[in-house]
Amino acid sequence: MKEKIFNEKNDIILYYIMVGFVFIYGAMYYYIGQNTNMNMLMFVLAFYVVYGVFNRGKIEFDIRFLLLFALYYFGASRDLGFVDYDLKYKTVIPVLVYAFGKEIVGNKKTESDKRIFISMLALAFGMYVQAMLDFSVNLQLEELQTENWNRFWSGTEQARTLFDFEFIFVTSMAFAAIMFWKRYKVLFSIVILLNVVLQIIDVMVEGRFNLFFLMIDICALALVFIFDRWSELSQKIRKTIIGVALGLVAFVAAFFVAFKINLFGLHDMYSNSYLSGSGGIFHNIRFQIFRAAWSEMMKNPDTGYALGVFGTAFNTSHNTYMEFGKEFGLTAFFYIAVYELFVLKDAAMLALNKNKNDLIKYILIASTINCFIYFFMEPSGNRYFFVFMITFFVHGMQRRKCELDKDNCAKTNWAKIREIMQNQYVGE
């Protein structure tokens, strides 16, 4: 009986059904999150997670799962005004999404990367569809809006920064699409084209996030790319890479000096562009708000706090992680902060796992970094749990990849990390 239900054929069929579900959710999560019966979402997630557990025949201990559950249960218990809604949905669905991310990867290491890749494509392309639908609403207005306009599915107002998030995973695939283009020429050509289009759209609506993410991804993942191949490179090529790196550092330093003294009017051009809005990139008002929020949380660790800064009742920390602390106190902030540290640790372990052919780790690392930065700068993850939990799906897949590669990820210790680093430069 068990073999008739839990077998490879049924597993593959269910997997592709859930991939379709991931695409649908990505393409209309504002509609699902606000206007439909969330019981259906909870049922679908619970069904697949339970199926995956029985198919595998065991449950692994995962502190990330417990931290997420503690976070949302604690918040729901404190937020008595919405206790019915929160206990039923916000407490259950986010942790199911994380578990769903782990289960969709499957149990076989040989198949896991393929399943992650297809799942990430479904999510990224689905969210891109929603972004284009939302942008179509803006195009129909008499004047193109750059701050707020209505969403396609719900008709409710959407900030530009929330619109930016809908492009985040296609942006996260850009580096991998360029560096591994020969592996999937047609598919990665489409990904690169979509990245060009989204950057044009972002300029039109004065968005900055995806341009910033692309720059961060190129810098961070280039280091991982070189690290994976360093032991195979000749001394001549290594010296060339080091020379180019030092040259880039010198160029960036010279550029900042020129920018600071307004050489060639660089500072004026920046100041007169939309990039300087809200204090610009380096002096953004969000950093000032974050410092004020941290101070208030330390003063009110148990009760949460109201945040009035800069002479106005700007009652948001503009930071998803700090928003949990603002609403529910230091305990809630501790849960989400520790959870994110574990997630970033998993990404670091993937980066240190030398494998020059591992396309998937580049996508997962970029997605994790970009999502962390986005929600560090935006409060929407606390306000819209059905948006924030999208990242839990990615975190779950990342964690399962680490679990399936235990020697290099799950059990990596600092002694081994030091050994890996030393082997790049010593005795080769």
Image: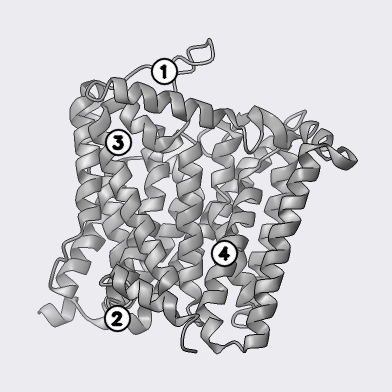
Q: Is residue 386 left or right of residue 74?
A: right
List the residue tagged with mark 4: 173
Q: How many marks?
A: 4
Q: CA distance from mark 1 to mark 3?
A: 16 Å
In the rendered image, the vertical position of residue 395 relative to residue 133, given as above or below: below
Label 1, secondary structure: give it.
loop
Q: Residue at x 60, y 79 (%)?
A: 184
List the residue tagged with mark 1: 307
Crowd around label 2: few <14 · some 14–19 · many ≥20 (10 Å): few
CB atoms of marks 2 and 4 within 8 Å: no
Question: Which numbered dot is residue 160?
Answer: none
Label 3, secondary structure: give it.
helix
List the residue tagged with mark 3: 333
Crowd around label 1: few <14 · some 14–19 · many ≥20 (10 Å): some
Q: CA distance from mark 4 to mark 1?
A: 37 Å
CB atoms of marks 1 and 3 within 8 Å: no
Q: Work out whether mark 3 precedes mark 2 in sequence or the reverse, and give the earlier one.
A: 2
